[in-house]
């Protein structure tokens, strides 16, 4: 079991590095390109980029809590109040990520409308719904863990 949790920890670190690279390299370049291509959408661009960076911060908080849960699994203490609190924080962070993704849908709509690409709205709509599904799953896990512990 320990090698599985170590693998998951490694995956978490890898995802964290990937998100860091996006925040440092890709997001600023994207903001610059969006400013050139769509100068008329100033507020929406700002909301889009703020949502991206906020969701990255929420991802890191959720990742730290997932790392804590993996440590609790290694210590054979997964059914504890600490784990329940970590699951609750993960649920809230993922819900926040969903809200961030929902906030940039108006910008995606305006871009899709100007580019005549309705599939773009559908694609980003699905991406915005995924965190809500994961958050509901985390809420179910939280309730199950509470039943076991309490």
Image: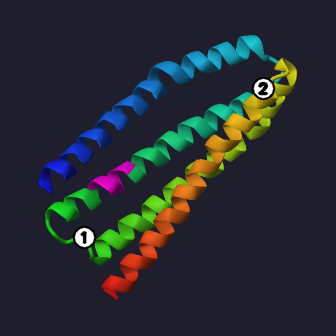
- Classify residue 84 by image quadrant: bottom left
145 sits left or right of 91 in the view: left
> Where residue 71 sits: x, y (%)?
20, 58
Is residue 44 at least partly visible in the picture?
no
Q: Main secondary structure of the magenta part?
A: helix
Q: Please give the residue where the numbered disc 1 appears in the rendered image.
A: 78
Q: Eyeballing the image, is 40 above or below 135?
A: above
Magenta stretch bounds? 63-67
Label 1 CA crowd tier, 10 Å (few <14, some 14–19, many 20+): some
55 sits left or right of 82 in the view: right
130 sits left or right of 2 in the view: right
Give the residue at the far top of this rendering.
36
Q: Eyeballing the image, is 72 above or below 124?
A: below
- In depth, the one of 150 and 52 nearer the eye is 150
Q: Residue at x 70, y 18 (%)?
A: 34
The C terminus is located in which quarter?
Answer: bottom left
- Classify residue 116 by image quadrant: top right
- Classify residue 14 by image quadrant: top left
Label 2 CA crowd tier, 10 Å (few <14, some 14–19, many 20+): few
Q: Which mark is residue 42?
A: 2
> Where residue 4 sits: x, y (%)?
19, 50
Q: Which mark is residue 52?
A: none
């Amino acid at each position: 079991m320990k090698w599985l949790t170590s693998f998951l920890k490694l995956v978490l670190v890898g995802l964290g590095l990937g998100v860091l690279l996006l925040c440092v390299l890709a997001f600023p370049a994207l903001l610059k390109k969006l400013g050139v291509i769509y100068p008329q959408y100033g507020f929406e661009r700002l909301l889009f980029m703020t949502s991206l960076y906020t969701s990255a911060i929420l991802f890191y908080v959720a990742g730290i809590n997932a790392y804590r849960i993996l440590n609790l699994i290694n210590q054979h203490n997964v059914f504890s109040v600490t784990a329940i609190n970590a699951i609750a924080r993960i649920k809230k962070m993922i819900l926040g990520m969903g809200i961030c993704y929902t906030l940039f849908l108006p910008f995606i709509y305006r871009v899709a409308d100007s580019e005549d690409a309705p599939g773009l709205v559908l694609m980003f709509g699905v991406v915005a719904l995924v965190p809500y599904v994961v958050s509901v799953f985390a809420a179910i896990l939280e309730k199950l863990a509470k039943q076991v512990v309490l």
